[in-house]
Image (cartoon, grey):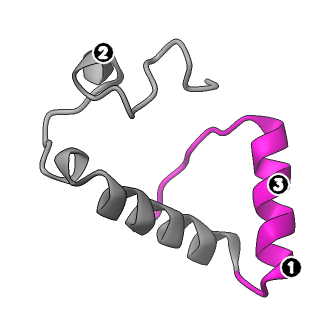
């Protein structure tokens, strides 16, 4: 599945450098990061009704005001 996301410029640059240094595509790195996040926060993986407006229920998820959009 393809998707479009917005990330802060500095985070994007760091991710790009990391991927290049570890011979990964950015997609491979993002998939791995998401998998590791879900493993570390299983309560998020079971939530199907998440939207930025409901981030207060999941303090580990950014609210719409801190998402970098």
Asked if the residue at tag 2 contacts the one at tag 1, i.e. Cβ–Cβ closer than 8 Å, the answer is: no
Tell me the residue at 46%/17% (across/down).
64
Q: Residues within 10 Å of mark 1 (few under 14, many from 20)?
A: few
What is the C-alpha distance between the residues marked 1 and 2? 36 Å
Q: Secondary structure at mark 2?
A: helix
Residue 10 numbered tag: none
Residue 46 in the image: above or below residue 64 = below
Residue 68 position within the rendered picture, expressed as x and y whole percent measured from the top left: 64, 25
Tell me the residue at 62%/38% (across/down).
6
Image quadrant in which the C terminus is located: top right
Q: Seen in the image, is 41 located left or right of residue 14?
A: left
Residue topped by disc 2: 53
What is the C-alpha distance between the residues marked 1 and 3? 11 Å
- Place residue 28 in its image quadrant: bottom right
What is the C-alpha distance between the residues marked 2 and 3? 28 Å
Tell me the residue at 22%/54% (across/down).
42
Residue 67 in the image: above or below residue 17 = above
Residue topped by disc 3: 14
Return the disc, 1 or 2, that comes first in the chain's sequence: 1
Residue 21 numbered tag: 1
Residue, far bottom: 23
The stretch drawn in magenta includes residue 21: yes
Q: Secondary structure at mark 3?
A: helix
Residue 60 position within the rendered picture, expressed as x and y whole percent measured from the top left: 38, 34
Residue 8 position within the rendered picture, expressed as x and y whole percent measured from the top left: 73, 35
- Place residue 14 in its image quadrant: bottom right
Residue 39 position within the rendered picture, expressed as x and y whole percent measured from the top left: 31, 64
Q: How many marks?
A: 3
Q: Which residues are magenta?
A: 1-24
């Amino acid at each position: 599945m393809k998707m479009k996301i917005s990330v802060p410029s500095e985070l994007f640059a760091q991710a790009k450098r990391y991927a290049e240094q570890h011979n990964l595509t950015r997609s491979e790195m993002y998939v791995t990061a998401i998998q590791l996040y879900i493993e570390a926060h299983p309560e998020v993986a079971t939530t199907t009704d998440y939207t930025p407006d409901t981030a207060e229920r999941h303090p580990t998820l950014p609210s719409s005001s801190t998402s970098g959009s």
